[in-house]
Amino acid sequence: MKLFQHHSQTSRLLTEGKPSKVIVSFAAPIFLSQLFQQLYNTADSWIVGNFLGKEALAAVNSSGSLIHLMTSFFVGASMGAGVVISRYFGAGDHERVSKAVHTNALLSFICGVVMSVFGALMTPVIMRWMGVPDDVMPNSVAYLRYYFLGCVPVVMYNSLKGVMNAVGDSRRPLYYLIVSSVLNVLLDLLFVGALGLGVEWAAIATVLSQTVSAILCLIQLTRKGTVYQLQWKKLRMDMASLKEIVKYGLPTGVQNSVIGFANVLVQTNINSFGGLAMAACGAYSRIEGFVFLPIMSMSLALTSYIGQNLGAKEYDRAKQGARFGVLTSVAMAEVIGIILFLFGGFFISTFITDADPEAVAEIIAIGARQCRVESLFFFLLAFSHAIAGVCRGAGKAIVPMLIMLLVWCVIRIIYITVAMHIRHEIVLLFLAYPLTWFISSVIYFIYYKKSDWIHGFEAKEKA
């Protein structure tokens, strides 16, 4: 027990205190961490758009959905380690925590290497498959290839951050990300703004900054005196831990990647509307990324909270926290959606400065239209993600995987294919999102009310 007391300053149990206060205080640093992480891509888009023009902005934006597709699988898979670690941490099983930490670190490094090699080699082929216009292609390939070459620190940071969140430490990842985000903006301004280098240097700046945050996480996790200390001599695959990580992480990874695949299809259709539409929708996606932050922060907080409390057999606390997290997430998302509905055009205008006023006006018009179509339905997006977070914390990661696979991938792709065949109109692409958010929310609501997501644990205990 002394060991647990010693590490309590850098980690904490989520099984003590008022559930609402615990969740908010834990989610707030996660939100700020994701806010600064979002600045990585946003800084690239804003600085590239203002210093290199609309073609370079379209090149950076055309890579966004593909980067999400390639990285989201491994980021989602690392969440499996978070579920395992939070469960054992809540139960006080320090030996299993240590084994899971070391297995997760080694697995993440291997995945990062594989993704770097595959992405760097396949970038031109994938860009052609996505139908990127010829005038945008060179910049798109250059940006994406350099980004992929730095995938190891990107994957490692997200993995190590997940370990720290699982043991209740959401503050240090925030501090590290603040440092690296500021560095990223400064490097973007230096490489692209001051030196006038090409768009690939925006990707290099992102990779260098992400490397700094990964190193800072490594330094923290290798400190002595914690149950989750990372020791080089212990880096090995513990098969029992690997099996659990894959069990909980693979469904989330598959879920994220199939959503990413559907978004790549959306991006391919956006590309068919030309460079101005690409720039507009890319600017909107950066804005929506900020909207997504409180939603994902609450979902991640709920996963760790539910995991620790079920591990400690605090079933009533788990139920109370789940209700609070879902309602809070929905309310926050809708307030943000109303703001974006009213001021979407202004936000879009901050991403582009071009010599052609007609082009700028068209970009703003397309982006503002997407804001009006999607923003008022953000509460549905928040509800789906909050329930998914609860499911993952309860060890039922297969449920959100199946729902997202069916709705956000299969149904979304079918809708887009049929809609574009009937009428080649960009607003029909925008409607794909609120439509599938609504369907998934209905399914999640029914599951949440009727399933044994928590009663199953109580039954096992009684047995």
Image (spheres, rainbow, N blue to C red):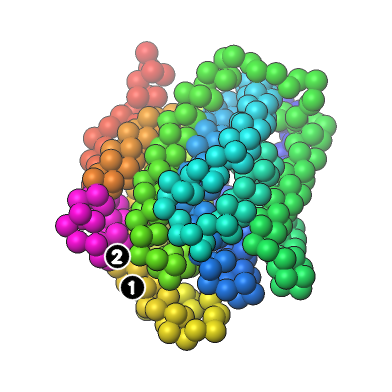
Q: Quadrant of residue 370?
A: bottom left
Question: Are the two marked residues, 2 and 1, in contact with CB atoms closer than 8 angstroms?
Answer: yes
Residue 412 at x, y = what percent? 28, 48
Count of numbered circles in the view: 2
Which quadrant, please, contains the N terminus? top right
State left or right for residue 192 relative to residue 84.
Answer: right
Residue 114 at x, y = what percent? 61, 31
Query: Which residue is rendered at x = 19% and y = 61% of the image?
Result: 423
Whether residue 71 is visible:
no
Cα–Cα gap, marks 2 and 1 = 10 Å
Residue that protrudes farthest toward the left in the picture: 422
Looking at marks 2 and 1 on the same chain, the residue that comes earlier in the sequence is marked by 1
Residue 176 at x, y = what percent? 72, 52
Whether residue 210 is visible:
yes
| Residue labelled with disc 2 | 426
Kind of residue indicated by mark 2 = Ile
Query: Which residue is rendered at x = 30% and y = 29% of the image?
Result: 452
Q: Tag 2, which secondary structure?
A: helix
Of the pair 309 and 210, the residue shown nearer to us: 210
Q: Tag 1, which secondary structure?
A: helix
Query: Mark 2 or mark 1, which is nearer to you?
Result: 2
Q: Quadrant of residue 449?
A: top left
Which segment is the magenta one? 415-441
| Residue labelled with disc 1 | 369
Mark 2 crowd level (few <14, some 14–19, many ≥20, 10 Å Cα): some
Residue 110 at x, y = what percent? 65, 28
Residue 309 vertical position relative to residue 436 in the rendered view, above or below: above
Of the pair 64 and 460, the residue shown nearer to us: 64
